[in-house]
Amino acid sequence: MEGNYLENAIKSDFGLDITIAEKITMGYSSQVFRAKLDGKDVFVRINKDSNLFRVEQLGYHILERQGIPVPKIIALDDKPKSIGHPTMIMSAAEGSNLDDMEITKEQKDAIYERVGELLRKINETKVEGYGPLRVKDHELVGEFSSWREYCESQEMYNLKVLDFAIEKGFLTREDYDKVGNIYAEIALLDFGKASLLHRDMHHEHFFVKDGAISGVIDLGLLAAGDPRDDIAVSLSFQNSEQQEYFRRGYGALTNDQMVNKYLITMLLRRTYFRSLDEIKGNVDILLPILRKALEKL
Protein backbone atom coordinates (compact mmCIF):
# COMPACT_ATOMS: atom_id res chain seq x y z
CA MET A 1 0.00 0.00 0.00
CA GLU A 2 1.56 3.30 -1.09
CA GLY A 3 1.23 6.28 -3.39
CA ASN A 4 -2.26 7.09 -4.61
CA TYR A 5 -3.76 4.00 -3.00
CA LEU A 6 -2.61 5.07 0.48
CA GLU A 7 -3.63 8.67 -0.15
CA ASN A 8 -7.15 7.56 -1.12
CA ALA A 9 -7.34 5.22 1.88
CA ILE A 10 -6.34 8.02 4.28
CA LYS A 11 -8.96 10.29 2.70
CA SER A 12 -11.62 7.61 3.12
CA ASP A 13 -10.68 6.58 6.67
CA PHE A 14 -9.64 9.91 8.20
CA GLY A 15 -10.92 12.63 5.86
CA LEU A 16 -7.37 13.96 5.42
CA ASP A 17 -5.87 14.96 2.08
CA ILE A 18 -2.28 13.73 2.22
CA THR A 19 -0.03 13.91 -0.84
CA ILE A 20 3.35 12.59 -2.03
CA ALA A 21 3.08 9.47 0.13
CA GLU A 22 6.38 7.57 0.10
CA LYS A 23 7.25 4.40 1.98
CA ILE A 24 10.37 4.81 4.13
CA THR A 25 10.41 1.63 6.24
CA MET A 26 8.72 -1.74 6.11
CA GLY A 27 8.88 -4.70 8.44
CA TYR A 28 6.92 -7.85 9.15
CA SER A 29 4.37 -6.07 11.32
CA SER A 30 4.78 -2.38 10.48
CA GLN A 31 5.09 0.17 7.69
CA VAL A 32 6.00 3.85 7.81
CA PHE A 33 5.29 6.43 5.11
CA ARG A 34 6.33 10.06 4.75
CA ALA A 35 3.75 12.38 3.19
CA LYS A 36 2.57 15.97 3.01
CA LEU A 37 -0.49 17.40 4.74
CA ASP A 38 -1.31 21.07 4.19
CA GLY A 39 2.27 21.50 2.93
CA LYS A 40 3.89 20.06 6.06
CA ASP A 41 5.66 16.72 6.55
CA VAL A 42 3.71 14.01 8.33
CA PHE A 43 4.29 10.32 8.97
CA VAL A 44 1.72 7.59 8.41
CA ARG A 45 2.45 4.51 10.50
CA ILE A 46 0.66 1.19 10.12
CA ASN A 47 1.13 -1.64 12.61
CA LYS A 48 -0.59 -4.91 13.40
CA ASP A 49 -0.41 -4.22 17.15
CA SER A 50 -2.90 -1.55 18.22
CA ASN A 51 -1.49 -1.56 21.78
CA LEU A 52 1.78 -0.10 20.49
CA PHE A 53 0.10 3.03 19.14
CA ARG A 54 -2.14 3.45 22.20
CA VAL A 55 0.91 3.29 24.48
CA GLU A 56 2.79 5.78 22.30
CA GLN A 57 -0.19 8.14 22.18
CA LEU A 58 -0.46 8.25 25.95
CA GLY A 59 3.33 8.47 26.25
CA TYR A 60 3.45 11.54 24.00
CA HIS A 61 0.67 13.15 26.03
CA ILE A 62 2.62 12.54 29.26
CA LEU A 63 5.80 14.05 27.82
CA GLU A 64 3.90 17.03 26.47
CA ARG A 65 2.39 17.72 29.90
CA GLN A 66 5.93 17.71 31.31
CA GLY A 67 6.93 20.45 28.87
CA ILE A 68 8.97 18.10 26.68
CA PRO A 69 8.65 18.94 22.95
CA VAL A 70 7.12 16.06 20.99
CA PRO A 71 5.40 15.56 17.61
CA LYS A 72 1.63 15.91 17.46
CA ILE A 73 -0.60 12.89 16.85
CA ILE A 74 -2.99 14.04 14.16
CA ALA A 75 -5.14 10.90 13.92
CA LEU A 76 -5.28 7.36 15.27
CA ASP A 77 -7.66 4.51 14.48
CA ASP A 78 -7.36 0.90 15.61
CA LYS A 79 -9.57 -0.42 12.78
CA PRO A 80 -9.68 1.92 9.78
CA LYS A 81 -11.97 0.37 7.19
CA SER A 82 -9.86 0.89 4.06
CA ILE A 83 -6.41 0.26 5.51
CA GLY A 84 -7.47 -2.61 7.75
CA HIS A 85 -4.73 -2.27 10.38
CA PRO A 86 -4.12 0.17 13.24
CA THR A 87 -2.94 3.44 11.73
CA MET A 88 -1.40 6.56 13.28
CA ILE A 89 -0.75 9.87 11.51
CA MET A 90 1.64 12.25 13.25
CA SER A 91 3.48 15.45 12.52
CA ALA A 92 7.20 15.47 11.84
CA ALA A 93 9.42 16.80 14.62
CA GLU A 94 10.66 20.32 14.00
CA GLY A 95 14.36 20.93 13.41
CA SER A 96 17.07 18.53 12.33
CA ASN A 97 18.85 15.47 13.57
CA LEU A 98 21.99 16.37 15.52
CA ASP A 99 24.17 14.45 13.05
CA ASP A 100 22.97 16.71 10.23
CA MET A 101 23.84 19.99 11.93
CA GLU A 102 26.95 22.13 12.06
CA ILE A 103 27.02 23.57 15.57
CA THR A 104 29.71 24.64 18.00
CA LYS A 105 31.12 22.39 20.70
CA GLU A 106 29.52 24.60 23.33
CA GLN A 107 26.11 24.20 21.70
CA LYS A 108 26.52 20.43 21.50
CA ASP A 109 27.61 20.24 25.15
CA ALA A 110 24.51 22.22 26.14
CA ILE A 111 22.30 19.90 24.09
CA TYR A 112 23.64 16.78 25.82
CA GLU A 113 23.15 18.41 29.19
CA ARG A 114 19.56 19.10 28.17
CA VAL A 115 19.13 15.48 27.05
CA GLY A 116 20.05 14.43 30.59
CA GLU A 117 17.51 16.86 32.02
CA LEU A 118 14.75 15.61 29.72
CA LEU A 119 15.42 11.95 30.44
CA ARG A 120 15.27 12.67 34.17
CA LYS A 121 11.91 14.35 33.60
CA ILE A 122 10.62 11.29 31.77
CA ASN A 123 11.88 8.99 34.52
CA GLU A 124 10.19 11.11 37.20
CA THR A 125 6.83 9.84 35.93
CA LYS A 126 5.84 6.82 38.01
CA VAL A 127 3.95 3.87 36.52
CA GLU A 128 2.03 0.97 38.02
CA GLY A 129 3.49 -2.46 37.21
CA TYR A 130 6.78 -3.35 35.52
CA GLY A 131 8.11 -4.19 32.07
CA PRO A 132 6.38 -3.63 28.70
CA LEU A 133 3.42 -1.28 28.84
CA ARG A 134 -0.26 -1.50 27.99
CA VAL A 135 -3.10 0.97 28.41
CA LYS A 136 -5.61 0.27 31.17
CA ASP A 137 -8.33 2.74 32.13
CA HIS A 138 -6.50 5.47 30.19
CA GLU A 139 -3.28 4.92 32.15
CA LEU A 140 0.03 3.26 31.25
CA VAL A 141 0.49 0.04 33.21
CA GLY A 142 3.37 -2.45 33.19
CA GLU A 143 2.45 -5.99 32.19
CA PHE A 144 4.10 -7.58 35.27
CA SER A 145 3.09 -7.13 38.90
CA SER A 146 6.66 -7.18 40.25
CA TRP A 147 10.15 -6.33 39.01
CA ARG A 148 11.33 -9.83 39.83
CA GLU A 149 8.52 -11.37 37.79
CA TYR A 150 9.50 -9.24 34.81
CA CYS A 151 13.18 -10.19 35.17
CA GLU A 152 12.27 -13.87 35.38
CA SER A 153 10.38 -13.54 32.08
CA GLN A 154 13.69 -12.48 30.47
CA GLU A 155 15.80 -15.37 31.80
CA MET A 156 15.71 -17.57 28.69
CA TYR A 157 16.61 -14.69 26.42
CA ASN A 158 19.43 -13.58 28.74
CA LEU A 159 20.85 -17.10 28.70
CA LYS A 160 20.73 -17.15 24.90
CA VAL A 161 22.61 -13.85 24.79
CA LEU A 162 25.26 -15.08 27.23
CA ASP A 163 25.81 -18.34 25.35
CA PHE A 164 26.12 -16.40 22.11
CA ALA A 165 28.71 -14.04 23.66
CA ILE A 166 30.80 -16.98 24.87
CA GLU A 167 30.57 -18.72 21.49
CA LYS A 168 31.75 -15.57 19.67
CA GLY A 169 34.51 -14.85 22.19
CA PHE A 170 32.96 -11.59 23.39
CA LEU A 171 33.10 -12.86 26.99
CA THR A 172 35.54 -15.00 28.94
CA ARG A 173 34.20 -17.72 31.22
CA GLU A 174 34.96 -15.45 34.17
CA ASP A 175 32.99 -12.64 32.51
CA TYR A 176 30.14 -15.06 31.86
CA ASP A 177 29.87 -15.82 35.57
CA LYS A 178 30.06 -12.13 36.48
CA VAL A 179 27.24 -11.22 34.11
CA GLY A 180 25.15 -14.11 35.43
CA ASN A 181 25.55 -12.62 38.90
CA ILE A 182 24.52 -9.21 37.56
CA TYR A 183 21.28 -10.64 36.15
CA ALA A 184 20.55 -12.20 39.55
CA GLU A 185 21.35 -8.94 41.35
CA ILE A 186 19.10 -6.91 39.05
CA ALA A 187 16.19 -9.31 39.60
CA LEU A 188 16.43 -8.76 43.36
CA LEU A 189 16.54 -4.95 43.24
CA ASP A 190 13.93 -3.04 45.21
CA PHE A 191 13.73 0.48 43.80
CA GLY A 192 10.08 1.06 44.65
CA LYS A 193 7.46 2.10 42.14
CA ALA A 194 8.56 1.84 38.51
CA SER A 195 9.59 4.85 36.45
CA LEU A 196 8.52 5.55 32.89
CA LEU A 197 11.49 4.60 30.68
CA HIS A 198 12.13 5.86 27.15
CA ARG A 199 14.58 2.98 26.54
CA ASP A 200 16.03 4.51 23.35
CA MET A 201 17.05 8.10 24.12
CA HIS A 202 19.96 8.88 21.79
CA HIS A 203 21.01 11.29 19.04
CA GLU A 204 18.70 9.79 16.40
CA HIS A 205 15.64 10.24 18.61
CA PHE A 206 15.80 13.92 19.44
CA PHE A 207 15.75 16.89 17.08
CA VAL A 208 17.39 20.29 17.41
CA LYS A 209 16.31 23.74 16.22
CA ASP A 210 17.96 27.08 16.99
CA GLY A 211 20.40 25.38 19.35
CA ALA A 212 17.70 23.74 21.51
CA ILE A 213 15.99 20.37 21.55
CA SER A 214 12.80 20.75 19.52
CA GLY A 215 11.42 17.23 19.55
CA VAL A 216 11.78 13.87 21.31
CA ILE A 217 10.58 10.97 19.16
CA ASP A 218 10.24 7.20 18.94
CA LEU A 219 8.41 5.97 22.02
CA GLY A 220 8.09 2.44 20.67
CA LEU A 221 10.18 0.94 23.49
CA LEU A 222 8.47 2.68 26.42
CA ALA A 223 8.56 0.53 29.55
CA ALA A 224 8.14 0.62 33.32
CA GLY A 225 11.25 -0.05 35.34
CA ASP A 226 14.46 1.15 36.95
CA PRO A 227 15.64 4.60 35.76
CA ARG A 228 19.26 3.43 36.03
CA ASP A 229 18.51 1.09 33.14
CA ASP A 230 17.34 4.04 31.02
CA ILE A 231 20.46 6.02 31.92
CA ALA A 232 22.65 3.13 30.78
CA VAL A 233 20.92 3.00 27.40
CA SER A 234 21.63 6.67 26.73
CA LEU A 235 25.23 6.53 27.96
CA SER A 236 25.99 3.66 25.60
CA PHE A 237 25.43 5.95 22.59
CA GLN A 238 27.67 8.75 23.90
CA ASN A 239 31.41 9.42 23.91
CA SER A 240 33.13 10.39 27.17
CA GLU A 241 32.65 14.12 26.62
CA GLN A 242 28.96 13.78 25.81
CA GLN A 243 28.55 11.55 28.87
CA GLU A 244 30.03 14.26 31.08
CA TYR A 245 27.38 16.80 30.07
CA PHE A 246 24.56 14.24 30.03
CA ARG A 247 25.46 13.24 33.61
CA ARG A 248 25.54 16.90 34.61
CA GLY A 249 22.03 17.37 33.23
CA TYR A 250 20.52 14.21 34.70
CA GLY A 251 22.11 14.34 38.14
CA ALA A 252 23.69 12.11 40.78
CA LEU A 253 21.86 8.90 39.87
CA THR A 254 24.05 8.57 36.76
CA ASN A 255 27.00 7.73 39.04
CA ASP A 256 25.23 4.83 40.76
CA GLN A 257 27.20 1.58 40.34
CA MET A 258 24.11 -0.22 39.01
CA VAL A 259 24.20 1.98 35.91
CA ASN A 260 27.41 0.26 34.79
CA LYS A 261 25.88 -3.16 35.45
CA TYR A 262 22.80 -2.33 33.42
CA LEU A 263 25.12 -1.04 30.70
CA ILE A 264 26.82 -4.44 30.47
CA THR A 265 23.56 -6.35 30.07
CA MET A 266 22.28 -3.90 27.50
CA LEU A 267 25.49 -3.99 25.43
CA LEU A 268 25.35 -7.78 25.36
CA ARG A 269 21.78 -7.66 24.06
CA ARG A 270 22.78 -5.21 21.35
CA THR A 271 25.74 -7.31 20.21
CA TYR A 272 23.41 -10.29 19.91
CA PHE A 273 20.74 -8.28 18.07
CA ARG A 274 23.23 -6.70 15.67
CA SER A 275 24.68 -10.13 14.87
CA LEU A 276 21.38 -11.52 13.59
CA ASP A 277 21.44 -12.33 9.87
CA GLU A 278 18.53 -10.02 9.12
CA ILE A 279 20.18 -7.11 10.97
CA LYS A 280 23.94 -7.44 10.34
CA GLY A 281 24.83 -4.32 12.31
CA ASN A 282 28.19 -3.05 13.52
CA VAL A 283 29.17 -5.19 16.51
CA ASP A 284 32.84 -4.18 16.69
CA ILE A 285 32.01 -0.66 17.86
CA LEU A 286 30.25 -2.09 20.94
CA LEU A 287 32.99 -4.44 22.12
CA PRO A 288 35.46 -1.84 23.51
CA ILE A 289 32.60 -0.22 25.44
CA LEU A 290 31.61 -3.63 26.81
CA ARG A 291 35.20 -4.41 27.82
CA LYS A 292 35.58 -1.07 29.58
CA ALA A 293 32.32 -1.62 31.50
CA LEU A 294 33.41 -5.12 32.54
CA GLU A 295 36.71 -3.75 33.84
CA LYS A 296 34.79 -1.48 36.24
CA LEU A 297 33.19 -4.40 38.08
Image: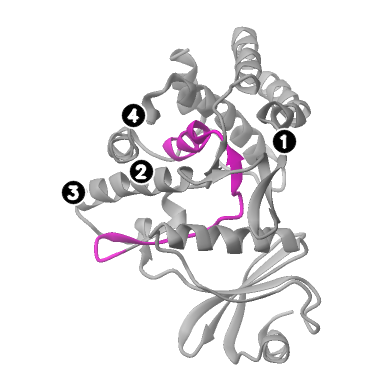
Label 4 to label 1: alpha-carbon separation: 28 Å
Q: Regarding mark 3 in the picture, which secondary structure is present there?
A: helix
Q: Residues within 10 Å of mark 4 (few under 14, many from 20)?
A: few
Q: Earlier in the sequence, mark 3 or mark 1?
A: 3
Residue contact at pointers 4 and 3, CB within 8 angstroms: no
Residue 88 drawn above or below residue 197: below
Three-letter amino acid code at the position of disc 1? Ser
Which circle marks residue 145 in the picture? 1
Q: Which residue is mark 3?
A: 106
Position above or below: 106 against 68 = above
Q: CA–CA distance between discs 3 and 1?
A: 44 Å
Q: Is residue 206 left or right of residue 170?
A: left
Q: Quadrant of residue 199?
A: top right
- Is residue 227 covered in magenta? yes
The extreme top residue here reads: 174
The boundaries of the magenta stretch are 209-236
Q: Nearer the viewer, residue 17 or 59?
A: 59
Foreground tag (3 vs 1): 1
User: Mark 2 vs mark 1: which is more N-terminal?
Assistant: 2
Residue at image position (25%, 66%) is: 210
**Tag on residue 252?**
4
Q: Which residue is mark 2?
A: 116
Disc 2 to disc 3, how far (Cα)?
A: 16 Å
Which amino acid type is shown beneath numbered disc 4?
A: Ala
Q: Residue at x 45, y 40 (%)?
A: 234
- Is residue 213 inside the magenta stretch? yes
